[in-house]
């Protein structure tokens, strides 16, 4: 391994060295010579023509000697091939370099002359008026010069990269030459020395080739820089001339008619081609149908081929293969005819765009300042056509690439078919012809699209500077027009469409309605304004009903709230009708979405319907005292979804309307506000019941909240274990906001005071307890234990 490692390193360096320059032919024929100095670096001064001619003669002599001499024994076959290749590259580089040396003065002279012409150009103080056709020609010249300048700069960048790569290759091979010199000195036998000498000479040839290529590249770069300078000066001059012409352009109607006549002539030619293409497409499809029927008939009549005796595949059917081959050719020919027909149709459409563009251009040149406001609209139209053409150009490029690849692959298939049988060759030839027709048609369309794209872009640039020179007032008018157009575009933006069934002359006709942003905003605005106005009207009506007709404020508030909801709903429907939006726009609520919305809103809808029922049936009203579940209080509001109940503690509880429909509800004031209440009291057995009844009746009559009619009454409820129990029943009226708990408390206070004044005690609970000692059977005396309450 230690001995193999240096060998591997040397082999890797040789492999990475790449192509390299040559040297003396005698060195590369195997004859050992003393070490020669390496080729001078390319960074030195450029060689003269005489030096290059000498180097070329020397290289050709070396190459002739190499081809006639026997190959060196130390060389390997791959290395001999590389040597011959390097010698050819060296001779080619020297020849090209010599040719560039001859061309360099001419290129530099042209650049100098063009620079002087550009510097000497002066604007004409009174330039003549020029036709717009001449202006377009001058613009085309400028665009062509800019394209050539761009290509020249790209070539210069590529040459810089090549020179850098050649310089790296040169330095790497110079290192290899020095290393081979050291290996030659270290060689111990003649065979190894001959081998290392051969590798050194091959590395020297790589150095010479790289140096020649780098010198050639630098000379070519010098010529390229001269060409770039010339084109820059020419482009600058053409820009000056174009600017002078652009300020004095006329576009007469006669010139427009001439342009349109030329376009019409091309359109007529395309229409003729389209007629022929349609006829060819129909013929191709008839032939395709015949081929398909022939194949189907043969498949129906032919018997399936039996496999071989040893299970081999069935032999091929020549007749069927021929029919399938013919069907494939007919299908390709039909596709080709369709493609030609479609492409010609699109070319006609593009020519129509061009014709309309020229007409608009004439109107723009001859329009007033007021008409110039439409410049943004014109630029938008041109930009839209540019996008369409760019998209079609991309499609054409992809199709051209596809058909070119298929044509190339078909060429290979044709060559193979010609060697096999005539039928395959004929089919391949037909396919190749079809692919070439497709490619030719697509290239023609691509050429037209590219030209029109160039024209439209030029027109767009033409509109831009004209807009930049407009007056301030015109700029304001144009800005306002742009803002109005933008607002109109947003206002007319279609959100979606809806089908509407209308009746015309007794027939149902389905029409499609457009729902735009403007219509939607109009509906919203109308509903909002109507809701605000109707709300104010309802409040006025509620106040009028309360003051003039004696309707309670709470009841009037509830009625106006529900009436407002009805009015807003009707406003919404009317707004949809005015905006010409059919109610079918809400058809999206059908299906699965309707199920989901139904499940999500079923509680809300249930409470809303319950609220309507409460409003119609009026089982409870605002101000009623109700008891539903664990809630007892006064109804203060009856809303769409829920009603509000205020308890005696002043807490407002929102009760869903459906609760009043589904649950048992106690309405203390349903038919009238009079409610019977009662207070229980117990007196001592020593007090006469009649006297107790008089005291209780006196209390009831004295309390101001107790109604006289119905009269209060006293009932002896029961003889209890500790007292005689009485119940005082009385009636109160909740209309005035009476508090039953407070009234009951006041009556109890009065009962306690009057009973005490009458000497009637209120007993407390008593129990008789018998105490017995253990072992004593004598009953003890009774002891009464009093338990105070």
Image (spheres, helix red, strand yellow):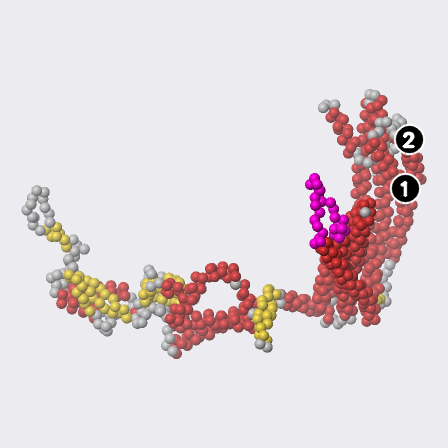
Count of all numbered marks drawn on residues in the image: 2
Real-space Cα separation, disc 1 to disc 2, in angstroms: 24 Å
In front: 667, or 690? 667
Residue 301 appears in the rendering: yes
Residue 262 within the segment the image draws in magenta: no
Relative placement, left or right, of 227 versus 480 is right
Q: In the figure, residue 285 lies in which quadrant?
A: bottom right
Point out the image quarter for the N terminus. top right
| Secondary structure of residue under mark 1 | helix
Across and down, in percent, residue 183 comes to 81, 25
In front: 305, or 285? 305
Q: Earlier in the sequence, mark 1 or mark 2?
A: 2
Could you tell me what secondary structure mostly forms the magenta stretch?
Answer: loop
Across and down, in percent, residue 664 comes to 33, 63
Point out the image quarter for the C terminus. bottom left
Q: Is residue 65 above or below residue 725?
A: above
Relative placement, left or right, of 604 versus 29 is left
- Residue for badge 1: 95
Mark drawn on residue 69:
2
Q: Residue at x 76, y 31 (%)?
A: 12
10 Å neighbourhood of mark 1: few (<14), some, or many (≥20)? Answer: some
Q: Which residues are magenta?
A: 299-324
Across and down, in percent, residue 575 comes to 54, 71
Mark drawn on residue 117:
none
Q: Residue at x 47, y 59 (%)?
A: 600
Relative placement, left or right, of 373 versus 220 is left
Residue 311 within the segment the image draws in magenta: yes
């Amino acid at each position: 391994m230690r001995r193999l490692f240096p060998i591997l390193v040397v082999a890797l360096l040789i492999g990475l060295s790449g192509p390299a320059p040559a040297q003396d032919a005698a060195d590369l024929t195997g004859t050992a010579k003393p070490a020669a100095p390496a080729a001078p670096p390319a960074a030195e001064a450029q060689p003269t023509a005489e030096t290059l001619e000498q180097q070329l003669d020397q290289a050709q002599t070396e190459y002739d000697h190499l081809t006639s001499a026997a190959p060196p024994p130390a060389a390997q076959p791959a290395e001999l091939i590389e040597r011959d290749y390097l010698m050819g590259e060296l001779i080619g580089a020297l020849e090209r370099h010599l040719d560039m040396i001859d061309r360099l003065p001419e290129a530099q002279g042209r650049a100098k002359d063009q620079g002087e012409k550009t510097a000497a150009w002066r604007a004409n103080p009174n330039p003549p008026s020029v036709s717009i056709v001449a202006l377009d020609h001058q613009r085309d010249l400028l665009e062509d010069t800019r394209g050539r300048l761009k290509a020249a700069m790209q070539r210069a960048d590529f040459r810089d990269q090549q020179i850098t790569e050649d310089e790296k290759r040169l330095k790497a091979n110079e290192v290899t030459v020095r290393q081979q010199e050291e290996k030659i000195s270290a060689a111990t036998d003649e065979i190894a020395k001959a081998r290392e000498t051969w590798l050194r000479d091959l590395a020297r040839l790589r150095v010479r080739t790289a140096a020649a290529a780098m010198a050639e590249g630098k000379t070519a770069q010098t010529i390229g820089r001269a060409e770039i300078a010339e084109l820059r000066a020419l482009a600058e001059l053409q820009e000056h001339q174009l600017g002078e012409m652009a300020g004095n352009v006329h576009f007469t109607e006669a010139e427009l008619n001439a342009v349109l006549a030329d376009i019409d002539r091309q359109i007529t030619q395309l229409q003729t081609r389209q007629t022929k293409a349609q006829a060819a497409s129909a013929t191709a499809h008839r032939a395709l149908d015949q081929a398909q029927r022939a194949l189907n008939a043969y498949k129906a009549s032919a018997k399936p081929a039996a496999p071989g005796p040893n299970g081999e595949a069935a032999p091929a059917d020549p007749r069927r293969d021929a029919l399938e081959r013919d069907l494939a050719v007919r299908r390709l020919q039909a596709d080709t005819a369709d493609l030609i027909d479609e492409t010609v149709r699109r070319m006609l459409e593009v020519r129509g765009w061009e014709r309309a563009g020229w007409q608009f251009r004439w109107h723009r040149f001859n329009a007033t300042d007021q008409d110039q406001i439409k410049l943004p609209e014109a630029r938008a139209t041109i930009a839209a056509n540019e996008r369409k053409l760019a998209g079609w150009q991309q499609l054409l490029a992809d199709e051209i690439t596809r058909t070119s690849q298929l044509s190339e692959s078909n060429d290979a298939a044709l060559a193979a078919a010609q060697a096999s049988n005539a039928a395959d060759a004929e089919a391949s030839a037909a396919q190749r012809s079809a692919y070439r027709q497709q490619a030719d048609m697509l290239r023609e369309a691509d050429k037209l699209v590219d030209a029109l794209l160039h024209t439209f872009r030029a027109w767009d640039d033409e509109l831009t500077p004209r807009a930049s020179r407009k007056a301030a007032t015109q700029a304001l008018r144009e800005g306002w027009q742009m803002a109005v157009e933008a607002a109109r575009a947003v206002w007319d933006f279609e959100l979606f469409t809806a089908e509407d069934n209308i009746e015309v002359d007794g027939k149902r006709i389905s029409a499609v309605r457009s729902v735009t942003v403007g219509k939607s905003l109009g509906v919203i605005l109308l509903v909002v304004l109507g809701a605000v106005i109707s709300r104010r009207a309802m409040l006025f009506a509620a106040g009028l009903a309360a003051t003039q007709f004696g309707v309670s404020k709470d009841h009037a508030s509830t009625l106006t709230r529900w009436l407002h909801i009805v009015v807003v709903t009707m406003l919404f429907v009317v707004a949809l009708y005015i905006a010409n939006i059919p109610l079918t726009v809400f058809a999206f609520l059908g299906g699965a979405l309707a199920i989901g919305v139904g499940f999500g809103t079923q509680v809300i809808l249930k409470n809303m319907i319950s609220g309507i029922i409460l409003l119609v049936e009026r089982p409870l009203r605002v101000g009623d005292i109700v008891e539903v579940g664990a809630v007892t209080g006064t109804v203060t509001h009856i809303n769409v979804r829920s009603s509000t109940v205020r308890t005696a503690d002043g807490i407002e509880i929102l009760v869903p309307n459906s609760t009043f429909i589904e649950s048992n509800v106690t309405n203390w004031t349903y038919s009238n506000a009079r409610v019977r209440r009662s207070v229980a009291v117990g007196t001592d057995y020593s007090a006469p019941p009649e006297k107790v009844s008089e005291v209780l009746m006196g209390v009831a009559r004295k309390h101001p909240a107790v109604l006289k009619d119905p009269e209060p009454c006293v009932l002896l409820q029961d003889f209890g274990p500790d007292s005689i129990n009485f119940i005082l029943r009385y009636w109160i009226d909740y209309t005035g906001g009476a508090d039953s708990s407070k009234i009951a408390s006041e009556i109890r206070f009065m009962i306690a005071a009057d009973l005490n004044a009458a000497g009637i005690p209120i007993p407390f609970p008593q129990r008789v307890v018998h105490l017995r000692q253990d072992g004593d059977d004598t009953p003890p005396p009774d002891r009464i234990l009093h338990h105070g309450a």
